[in-house]
Image (cartoon, rainbow, N blue to C red):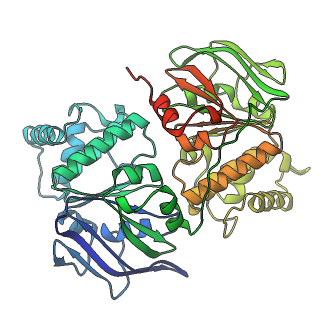
Amino acid sequence: MNEEMLVMSNISKKYGGVQALKSVDFSVKRGEVHCLVGENGSGKSTLIKIISGAIQPEEGAEIFVNNQKENQLTPIKSIQKGIQVIYQDLSVFPNLSVGENIFINYYAKGGNKWVNWKEVNQIARDTIRKIKVNLDFDDNVGSLSIADRQLVAICRAIATNAQLIIMDEPTSSLARHEIEALFLVIQQLKDAGITVLFVSHKLDEILKISDRITVLRDGNKVGVYERDEINDNKLSYLMTGKEFIQKKILGNRKKGKILLEIRGLFKKDQYEDINFKLYQGEILGIAGMIGSGRTELALSLFGMNTPDKGEILLEGKRVDFKSNESAIKASIGYVPEDRIDQGLIMEQAIRENTTVTIFKELLDNLGMINRKKQLSIVNYWIDSLSIRVGNVENPVNTLSGGNQQKIVLAKWLAINPKILILDSPTVGVDIAAKNSLYQIMRELSKRNIGIILISDEVPEILYNCHYILLMQKGKIVEESLPKEITEKELGAKIIGDRK
C-alpha cells in the first residue's frame, strides 16, 4: 500500500462533561478505502469534523497531511489540502445545474467576478468523464435522484483535486442497485489514487468495500483491522462489546384473527393487484427496493395515498381512509422511512414529539394540556423502550439516530395501535440500536399488535418476520416463510430484474 496521506495522533475532544474522543490515533493511506465504524456517540462525527477543520482538537494533538504538519486546520485549509467531506445532506445547490455545482468551489475561493461558462462546462465534462458516470451537466440538480445528487457531490470534490474524500453514511437513502453503482465509483476513485474514508452503520457494506477498518467505541480507538481478518460478528462485537445472535422466526405462518386484508389494491403508476392478509401478532415483511412501490402502498394503508381501486378491510370491515387522521382513529400507526422530515418535529421538545399523536387526550376542561398526565406518558414510553434521554424538554434533534427512532415509535405506541407500519425503521441507526428495535418489534408482536415491516435490508426482513412478501415494480411477486429462503437468495430476489 502507498504512503500515508493523513496521520493524526493524540486526538482528544471534550464537549462539556462528555469526552467525545480520548487520545485517538488515526491514519489513512493514499489510494485506500478506509471504513470508520462505531455506534452513535462513538466519536466518528467528531473525528470527521476535526479532519475537515470544522472543530479543533485539544492541546497535544498532532495532524500531518501529506507528511506536512498542520498546526490548525480550518475548513478552507482542509479543502486546499485536498480533503473533501460529503455529508448525508450532500450540500448541493438544487437550483443550480450539474455543471455549476461541480464548478462552484472555484468561485468559493473568491477573486472571480465573472463566470467563464466555457470553463464551467469543460471542467464539468472532464470530471464526469473521469469517473464514467451518466450525468448531463445542463440538468438542474433539483430534478435529480438522491443517487445522482451524490455523484454530483463526488464530481465536485474531484474537480477541486480532492485527495481524500470522506463519505458520511452515503448509502442511507439509496436503493440497492444505486449502492452497487456507488461502489463502482468508489473503486474508480481508488484506482485513481484518491483515498476514500467511508462511514456507515451497514456492516455488509463495510465488509464489501473496505481495505482497512478503524473501530471506535465510546471515544476510544478499539483498533485498525485489515478487511480479511474480520467478519460481521467480530465487527459487531468490536463496535459494541456485545454479541448479537440472529435467528429466524421458524415454523409455519402465524395465523389467527385477521387484522388487515388487502384485496386487489391498485394505484396507477405505483402498484397493482396487491393482495395479502395481516394476522394478529404477526410481523409481516414486505421486501423491496426503493421504487418498488413499497412506500406508496404503505401510505395508502395509512390514508395518505388514496388507491384507485381495491379494498382495505380492517378486522373484516371495509374502510376507505381519506386521511391519516382516519387511519389513526382506526388504530393504525406509521413510522415513515424519513424520520427527520416526516417522523419528527426536530426543533421541538422530546416531550412534545412523544405525545403529538394524543394531544387531544391530554387536554383538560379548559382546553389546556395536562402536563402531569403528559409527563407520565412520556416517562412511561422512555422507560418501556429504554430511550436514552437527558431531559425531555431538550429538542429531539439532540438525540442519537436510534433514540430518535424510538421516539417516533413511542408516539405511535401511545395511540395503542392494532397495526403498526414500519417503513425502513433502522435507516441510519447503529447495530446496537437496530437490535434494540428488533427486540421491541418482537415484544409488540407478543402483545398481538400486527406489524408490517418494509425494508430492503435482507437480514432485517429474514430474521424478524413471520412471513415475507417480495415486491417488485409495484407488484407482490413472491411469498415465503423465512425457513424457506437464505440471505443470498432473498438478496438476489430483492434486486430482481430492473429492466
Q: Is residue 347 visible?
A: no
Figure quadrant of the C terminus = top left
Give percent across and percent down for residue 37.
43, 62
Choose top left, top right, bottom left or bottom right for residue 168: bottom left
User: Where is 57 relative to 81, above or below?
Assistant: below
How far from the left and from the top, in percent, is residue 240? 55, 66
Nearer-the-camera pick, 223 or 51: 223
Drawn side of residue 190 relative to residue 428, left or right: left
Image-based side of 334 in relation to 381, left or right: left
Is residue 286 in view? yes
- The answer to which image quadrant residue 23 occupies is bottom left
Q: Nearer the viewer, residue 430 or 80?
A: 430
Give the image quarter of residue 98.
top left
The image shows residue 178 at horizontal and vertical percentages of: 37, 36
Q: Is 457 or 487 nearer to us in this picture? A: 487
Residue at point 49%, 62% (across, down): 234
Name the residue located 51 percent from the left edge and 66 percent from the top edge.
239
The image shows residue 2 at horizontal and vertical percentages of 16, 65
